[in-house]
């Protein structure tokens, strides 16, 4: 039986860990960063609860780069690094006898880089995927171990895509870990001629510019909704989070209105003129509500 170390720090990590432990995989060490370390995503998850269900302990660390000796003592064949917001240094990558497996929610070699779920939805893509790959010193550049594509529908948002990624990752683990146990190690070289790299998202990327099309605003809102930080606009000089919206059709008679103008307020729903139509904000943090005729 192969020896595995598992490292992770988010809800996705916990979902994968539960699956691997349920499969009876020989995980000899479970490692999780402490929550207080800066730079974590909003979906940070303490892996202790999942580990405890299977009678396992968790080792908490601050910087993975300082943990090479501990990992070396575990004598792993494979290290699963699924959901870690820290760079894994070469001195750790070289420890396992087989290698380190990471994940990226895109169809590598396309869409390497930061925030792939957010960018895929914000850019209006209709397809993406999950790739499990052998980590090297590059950025999402290692050999592919397993991958699968999925659809992005107009009803999908960050949370539903996050769940799709979780389910597909577990499916790939269940299909491919048995091969590792038998000593079969699949490695598929990435085609570097097809590479593009997404940059790190900035605060300004999450701000709604009402001059954009209704579709672009709709995509931005669903890309940044929970478990992420939310899109935002500025009202009376303050940031307001926007969590859900829908495009309103039949607004041809509003072509003379300026983008950002409040068209109507019905209950908690706020309709706003956009660059090419009207969008309705259905879930938000407005307090108080803006009035019809005001501007965002």
Image: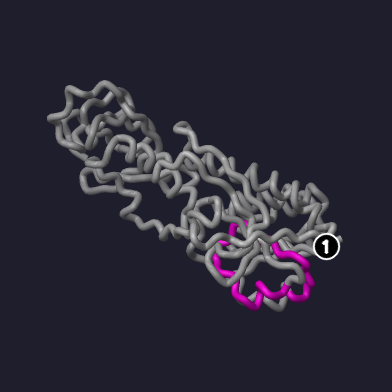
Could you say which is closer to the camera, residue 73 or residue 100? 100
Image position of 46 with respect to 259: above or below:
below
Left or right, residue 37 beside residue 123: right
Could you say which is closer to the camera, residue 26 or residue 56? 26
Q: Which residues are magenta?
A: 72-95
Image x and y of residue 13, in percent: 64, 53
Any part of residue 36 in sight: no
Image position of 175 with respect to 290: above or below:
below
Could you say whether the residue bearing mark 1 is in a helix, strand or loop? loop
Any part of residue 254 in sight: yes
**In the image, what residue occupies the spot 39% across and 45% down?**
123
Image position of 246 with respect to 8: above or below:
above
Residue 165 counted in the magenta span: no
Could you say which is closer to the camera, residue 289 or residue 185? 185
Image x and y of residue 221, in percent: 38, 40
- Number of other residues with Cα within 10 Å of mark 1, as a class: few under 14, some 14 to 19, many 20 or more: some
Image position of 114 with respect to 283: above or below:
below
Image x and y of residue 134, in percent: 65, 63
In which quadrant is the N terminus drawn?
bottom right
Image x and y of residue 265, in percent: 26, 26
Q: Which residue is mark 1?
A: 2
Left or right, residue 51 beside residue 157: right
Q: How many marks?
A: 1
In which quadrant is the C terminus drawn?
top left
């Amino acid at each position: 039986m192969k020896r595995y170390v598992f490292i992770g720090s988010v809800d996705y990590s916990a979902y994968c860990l539960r699956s691997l432990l349920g499969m009876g995989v020989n995980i000899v060490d479970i490692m999780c960063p402490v929550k207080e370390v800066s730079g974590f995503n909003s979906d940070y998850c303490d892996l202790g609860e999942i580990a405890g269900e299977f009678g396992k302990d968790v080792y908490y660390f601050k910087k993975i780069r300082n943990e090479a000796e501990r990992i070396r003592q575990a004598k792993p064949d494979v290290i699963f690094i699924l959901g870690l917001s820290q760079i894994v240094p070469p001195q750790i990558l070289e420890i396992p006898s087989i290698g380190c497996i990471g994940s990226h929610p895109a169809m590598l070699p396309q869409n390497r880089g930061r925030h792939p779920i957010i960018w895929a939805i914000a850019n209006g893509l209709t397809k993406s995927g999950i790739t499990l790959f052998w980590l090297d010193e590059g950025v999402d550049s290692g050999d592919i171990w397993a991958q699968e594509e999925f659809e992005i529908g107009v009803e999908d948002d960050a949370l539903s895509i996050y769940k799709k990624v979780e389910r597909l990752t577990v499916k790939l683990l269940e299909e491919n870990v048995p091969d590792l146990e038998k000593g079969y190690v699949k490695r598929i070289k990435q085609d570097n001629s097809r590479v593009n790299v997404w940059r790190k998202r900035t605060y300004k990327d999450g701000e709604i510019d009402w001059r954009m099309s209704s579709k672009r605003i709709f995509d931005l809102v669903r890309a940044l909704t929970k478990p992420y930080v939310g899109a935002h606009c500025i009202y009376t000089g303050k940031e307001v989070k926007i969590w859900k919206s829908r495009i309103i059709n039949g607004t041809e008679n509003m072509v003379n209105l300026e983008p950002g103008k409040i068209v109507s307020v019905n209950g908690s729903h706020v309709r706003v003129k956009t660059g090419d139509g009207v969008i309705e904000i259905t879930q938000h943090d407005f307090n108080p509500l803006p009035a019809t005729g005001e501007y965002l």
